[in-house]
Image (tube, helix red, strand yellow):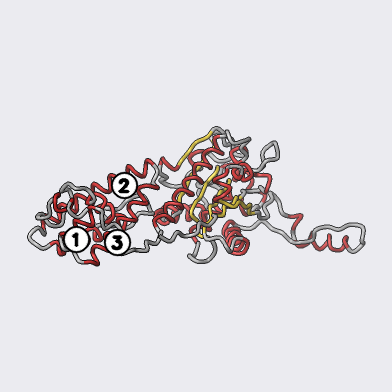
Amino acid sequence: MIEPRPKKVAVVFVHGFTGGSSTWTNKDGKKFHELLGLDQSLGEGFDFFEFEYFTQLVDVFKSAPIRRVLKLLNRTGLVNFDTRIKQNKPIKYLSHLLNGYLRTELYDYEEVVLIAHSMGGLIAKDHILNYVSGEGPRPIGYVSMAVPHKGSLASVLLSPLANVNAKELQPLSEYGDELNTDWHERKDELPRCMYLVASNDECVKETSSIPYKVKTADKFTLDYDHASICKPDGTSDLVYKRVKIFLDDILYNNKMAEVSSFEYVSDENDFNKEVFVIKLILSEVGEMGVADAKTSFFHAEIISKAARREDKIQLADLQTKVISLYRQTYNANKHKDADDIFSAVHKELRDQDSALLMCAMRYINFIHKGGLLHQVANRLDGTVIWDKRVTPDDIRGRM
């Protein structure tokens, strides 16, 4: 067995409209990601970052004309103003900035989780929808915190300031509607998502804090306002606990994906004293079939042992379906020899892999499903057989 080397996942915090690093800082000066990093498993599994961009209510003082005046003043030698031109940019443009940041600053990471507050959630959504495989870390998680998915009435009051983002954040804006439509239509392609709603949000109402048709399991309403939901006081805060659970789940799923990808290096004598192998040999199933059964049994065993309780329940349900397919296929081919029955059963498992045998556990594949069958075959009873002439006494004689 060759085990793959685990890699850390990047977690990037994306602030919102007129926000910055202070968005994530509580009254004691502790940042959200610093609290998360105190947890040993999170600290070992993730690296934390903050993505910042220019966003101000009014950007006139960062405009080109004002910058030119400041350059002239700098020539006096009495002052040293920052003369770089900065402007509020559309969300689509800010998404491009996030993309460039991830592909440059985090170029050596394979996966990223985006935790976003307010307008930052729209920037992150745009990036996820336009992500191209192989170009920067792949988004595997998205946490939405008080994000105006359907707009914010507060932004209407800011529209006279000619702020480009205030206009985009208005309810029923063309950009917001397109973003929500794409998000819903491509829901099966999205990373794992969680939507945190602030019950006392004075800027984003609850109906706007979630996109179209979100699963109840992905939505959590918590007792915060718009600003406090991203500044947990400590590890006992509900928002901290909820984000920690989300990240723990990602670590677990990554661990299971690693376990499922272990390379099985076979030995000719592996499992030869196991009941499922003896059944195959006595039934005269071909050696390639026996080797395949050993591999799938191995993968099913390590998945079954590593799975947490709720996944074990799903595995048991999946195994029941596998046995049902086996029985139907065996019955339809019972007059054939064991080799043909074995092939017919495994063909049916392959054909139903993404249909009757589809499951929510993404780390489970066809090989594991075949292994679930051989786990049941690893009993002396007749639940799974390949040749009805092979008796329990025959099997005991080879053990």
Name the amino acid type tagged 3. Answer: Asn
Dividing the image into 4 quarters, which one contains the N terminus?
A: bottom left
- Quadrant in which residue 297 is drawn: bottom left
Which label is found at residue 281? 1
Numbered disc in front, either 2 or 3: 3
Q: Residue furthest left?
A: 335
Label 1 element class: helix
Q: Position of residue 284 (x, y in %)?
A: 16, 63
The mark nearer the N terminus, 2 or 1, is: 1
- Nearer to the camera, 368 or 62: 368
Name the amino acid type tagged 2. Answer: Leu
Crowd class of label 1 (few under 14; some 14 to 19; many from 20; radius 10 Å)? some
Q: Dot 2 corresponds to which residue?
A: 315
The mark nearer the N terminus, 3 or 1, is: 3
Q: Position of residue 238 (x, y in %)?
A: 54, 35
Label 3 element class: loop
The mark nearer the N terminus, 2 or 3, is: 3
Residue 51 visible in image = yes
Task: Using the numbered discs, state the Cα–Cα distance from disc 3 to disc 1 in whole angstroms.
Answer: 13 Å
Residue 93 visible in image = no
Crowd class of label 2 (few under 14; some 14 to 19; many from 20; radius 10 Å)? many
- Nearer to the camera, 50 or 124: 50
Looking at the image, residue 42 lies above or below residue 178 = above
Which label is found at residue 269? 3
